[in-house]
Image: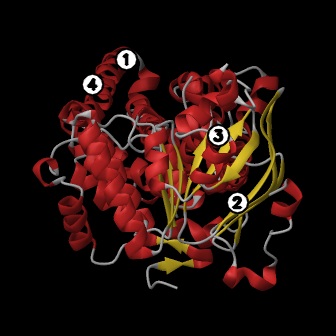
Amino acid sequence: MTENDKASSWPTVADRSLSAAIAVDHLVKVYKQTRAVDDISFSLPRGSITGLLGGNGAGKTTTIATIMGLVLPTSGRVQVLGHRMPEESASVLGRMNFESPYVDMPMRLTVRQNLTVFGKLYAVKNLSERIAELAYDLDLTEFIDRANGKLSAGQKTRVALAKALINQPELLLLDEPTASLDPDTADWVRGHLERYRKANNATILLASHNMLEVERLCDRVIIMKRGRIEDDDTPEAIMARYNRTTLEEVFLDVARGRVNGAQEDAR
Amino acid sequence: MSELTVHRGISLHRIGAMILRYWYLLLSSWPRLLELLYWPALQVITWGFLQLYIAQNANFFARAGGTLIGAVILWDILFRGQLGFSISFLEEMWARNLGNLMMSPLKPIEFLLSLMIMSLIRLAIGVIPMTLLALFLFHFNVYALGVPLIAFFCNLIFTSWSVGIFVSGLVLRNGLGAESIVWTLMFGIMPLACVYYPVSVLPVWLQYVAWTLPPTYVFEGMRALLIENTCRTDLMLGALAINVVLLVASFGAFLALLRSARMQGSLLSGGE
C-alpha cells in the first residue's frame, strides 16, 4: 500500500460513525532540528491489534503521544474514534486509555487508592465492583492495599494495566506493556489483552521491542525507522516479503538497512 | 450532562477525584502533615516575641500593637497559599503522573480548581493553629479584625493562586529544572509588598511598582486598621481589581505554557 493510498482513506466528517479507531494523515513532528515523525499516514480499523515496531528514536513514542494529544503535531492530522485530536479530545479521552513507561502511578498511594482516583476521573460506574473485578483479573488482590512504591516492577506493570483498563476503553495505547515482566507473567498479560480485545471489540495499538509478543498479538505491524513508515502489513506478509521466518529477523534487516537480508545471510 | 457537571462542562466529580488524590497523599505521610504546622508555628513564635520586645521599648510599636504579628499571619496566608497550590502540582511532577492526568478526561481548569481547593485545605491545616498560637501566646486575636479580615484573606489567596498558576505553567513547560521558582518567586515580591513597613518608606519611583501588587494594598489596609482603626475599602477594591487581572493573565499564561509543553513534548518527559 502506498502512502497516497493510505492518505485517501482519511475519513470525512460525514462518515465519522463508520470511521477508523485511529486515522493519522501526513503526520509530521519536528523538535528543533530533529524530524521525529516524518509524514506518516495510516488508519486502524476498530477491533484490531496493531504493533508499532522500530528501534530507539524511530518515532514510535512520539506517534503514540500525538495520537493521545500529549504532543501537538507540526503538521498533519490525527483523528481518534471519529474526533480530531487534540481539538476534540474532550469527546474521546474518557473512551480511551494508555500505559507507558514514561509515566508512573503515584507511589505513596495504595493500589486501591490509585484505582479509585482514576476510576472517578473516568467517571466509572459501580467503581468498587470494577476495582474488585480488575483486582481478580490481574491478580492484584494480595497487594491492593499496599503503596504503589512498595511493589515489584512486575506488580507495578499489572497495576498500570489495571489503570489502563479501569474505564473499559474502546481504544488502548500501550508502550512496552510487558517490558519489566518475567516470561510467565508477560505471557499471562498478553492472554489478558487478547481476551479483553475479543470481549470488548477494543482497538489496541502497542509499541514493543518484543517481536514474539507482536507476532502473537498483532494482526498488523507498522515498522518505523527514522520517523517514517518502512513497512505496514500483516506479520506473515512482512516476513514473507523479507523472506524471513521471524519478525526479529525482519526488524534487524530494517534496522541495518538490508533489503535482501536473507540472501546476504545465505552468502 | 452529569448532574455533577457545571458551567462549560466543568465536572465537580473530576475535581473531587483530584482532591481525594491529594487528601490520600497528605494522609500517607505524617512528616509532611507536621511540616504544614511546623513552619507557620515557628514564624509566629519568633515574630511574636520580637513584637513583644519592641513594644516594651518603643512607643510607636506599643501603639501599633499587632502590626508585626498580624503581618506575619497575613504573609503566611499569601506564601503558604501559593506553596499549597504549587506543592500539590509538583507532587504530580515528582510522581511522573502528569501524563496520566493529561491523558484522562480531566480538563486544565478542573486541575487548577482542585489545586486551589487543596491550597485552602493545606492553608487551613497550617494557619489556623498559627492564629490560635498568636492568640494564646501573644494575645493577638486576628479574628477580631472582623469583616476586613475576609477581604484581606480573599485578596491574598487570589494573589497566591495567580502566582501558583503561573509558576506551575513554568514548571510544566520547563520541567523540574524550574522547580526552584516555586520556592523563591514569592520572596521576590516580599520587599515590594511592604509586609512589615509602610509603602511611604520606599523611594517614590519604587512606590509606583509596589502599588501594582495586590498584597501591598492588603498590608497597608491592615496597618490602617490596627493603627488608625480605619477600614480602607478603597484599598481592598483596588487589590481586587488587580487580582482579577492577574488571575485571568495567569490562567492565559498557564494555557499558553501548556500548549508550548505539548509542542515540545515535555509532558511525557517532565524531568530536568
Q: Tag 3's secondary structure? A: loop
Disc 3 or disc 1, which is closer to the eye?
3
How many residues crowd mark 2 within 10 Å: few (<14), some (14–19), many (20+)? many
**Picture coordinates of residue B16 (x, y %)?**
38, 64
- Name the residue nearer the viewer: B39 or A174: A174
- From the image, tell me which residue sits under label 3: A243
Which chain is mark 4 on? B
**Picture coordinates of residue A188 (x, y %)?**
27, 51
Tag 3 or tag 2, which sits nearer the N-term? 2
Report the number of discs: 4
Look at label 3 and name its amino acid.
Answer: Asn
Q: Are marks 2 and 3 on the same chain?
A: yes
Q: Which mark is residue B54?
A: 1
* Residue A34 visible to the viewer: yes
Q: Does residue B208 sit above or below A49 in this rendering?
A: above
Q: Tag 4's secondary structure? A: helix
Q: Residue at x 33, y 78 (%)?
A: A125
Q: Which mark is residue A86?
A: 2
User: Which of the 4 image quadrants contains residue A193?
Assistant: bottom left
Q: Are marks 3 and 4 on the same chain?
A: no
Disc 2 or disc 4, which is closer to the eye?
2
B245 lies left or right of B37: right
